[in-house]
Image: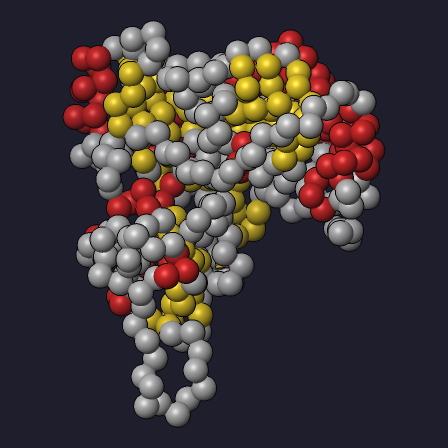
Amino acid sequence: MTRTSPDSCPGVLRLHQAADGPLARVRVPGGRLEAQQLQALAEAAHELGDGNIELTSRANVQLRRVRDATELTARLETAGLLPSHTHERVRNIVASPLAGRVGSRADVHQLVPALDAGLLAAPRLADLPGRVLFTLDDGRGDVSGLGGDIGVHAVDADEFAVLLAGLDTGIRVSATDAVDVMLAAAHGFLDLSSGQWRLHEIENGVERLTDLLGLAARADLLKIAAIQDIPIGWLTQDNGLVSLGAGVRLGSLPARTAEFIAAVERPVFLTPWRSLVLADLEEWPAEQVVRVLAPMGLIFDANSPWLLVSACAGQPGCAKSLTDVRADVGAAVDSGRIQPDSATFNSDAPHSELVLPQPDPTSSDTPSAPVFEAGEVTVGERQHWSGCARRCGRPRGAVTDVVATPDGYRVD
Ligand code: SF4
């Protein structure tokens, strides 16, 4: 595939003109935010944006309806969230959120600063498309299945599989070499690219880039699967401290809630499932955090129906949207229609066996996929609601699609 235009991914210095106003995307390598950085984002969201911090599927954040881009730039620079004006959009680095704390083979968070620094230090790598994604998986398989372009996956404490376009190349490297090999792959991507935004768009890109790396490859390859493994609730760390995994309704974190999280003064890890992990807590403070933040809407219950749903921006943020999908999915959750045991869902069946109302057999209309009013949609299991057929933000893996059409919602 050959692209005829550069990617249009937004940043802080290049805002996206959304239907509801300018949108800024802030890269957060490894998803790690220090407390003062989260506080700076909360204040910016409150004073310069729409009052919310949006979490993205790459563990970055977005601010909507930005009123003063110059002021936002200055604040983010002060907070250390915009270390480069040339490379800001290429710092798409996702790492296993619990790495180094809960049950990981290797602490891939230790590699993130070196990878970020390597990207920033190479003037040429500013030319990487903003779509290129780096993944660092601690061996549990939670981020390798996101379909990143260049990644490493821990197979042992000091051995990593090199992934390209989400596939195991057979190359194995040590922790010492992992960052250098990923940076070499980034340069190789530019060598091979003729305008493509992603490695899989380059003809035989994986094979050609593997050859360019010039490293020995083994034949027995890892099978990489797309799984959704949202860390939720009380997670005892290997060192005895506690991490709290918290779901965020539709990935939209109110600035006020973010300020309370920042006040805990512990590291926060954003996840690619639009949730967060508050790490390194003693037990008593962890209990108080749950007591305060659960009533504010953070989700610590792994059985919450909010964890089953995601949605695109919809109206009013997207001009293409046929409806306000986020309001519709919120109403579905609040009314109890989003449950694994929903009446129209057979929980023992795969998604293709959803039990949906059938069209009226007496109708003379041409048979077509049934559509539903927003208040009729009742689906169990994981689902993604979209305001049009583009299905932006759809998670990878097994997901039921709820897609707005001019006549109502279709369930695929
Ligand atoms: S899926 Fe359609 S409506 Fe939703 S954000 Fe994308 S383009 Fe807009």
Give the residue at x 26% y 46%: 305
Residue 402 vs residue 248, the one in the foreground: 402
Q: Is residue 37 above or below residue 352?
A: above
Give the residue at x 56% y 51%: 17
Q: Is residue 138 above or below residue 299?
A: above
Q: Position of residue 99 (x, y in %)?
A: 45, 18
Q: Is residue 402 visible?
A: no
Q: Is residue 81 above or below residue 54?
A: above
Give the residue at x 46% y 25%: 140
Quarter placement of the C terminus: bottom left
Quadrant housing residue 52: top left
Residue 4 vs residue 21, the one in the foreground: 4
Total numbered circles? 0
Q: Residue furthest top?
A: 239
Residue 87 vs residue 113, the one in the foreground: 113
Q: Is residue 124 left or right of residue 65?
A: right
Q: Position of residue 162 (x, y in %)?
A: 65, 25
Q: Is residue 237 visible?
A: yes
Q: Is residue 258 left or right of residue 139?
A: left
Q: Position of residue 26 (x, y in %)?
A: 53, 33
Give the residue at x 39% y 92%: 364
Q: Position of residue 101 (x, y in %)?
A: 39, 14
State the colouring used for the structure image.
secondary structure
Q: Is residue 311 left or right of residue 107?
A: left
Quadrant housing residue 212: top right
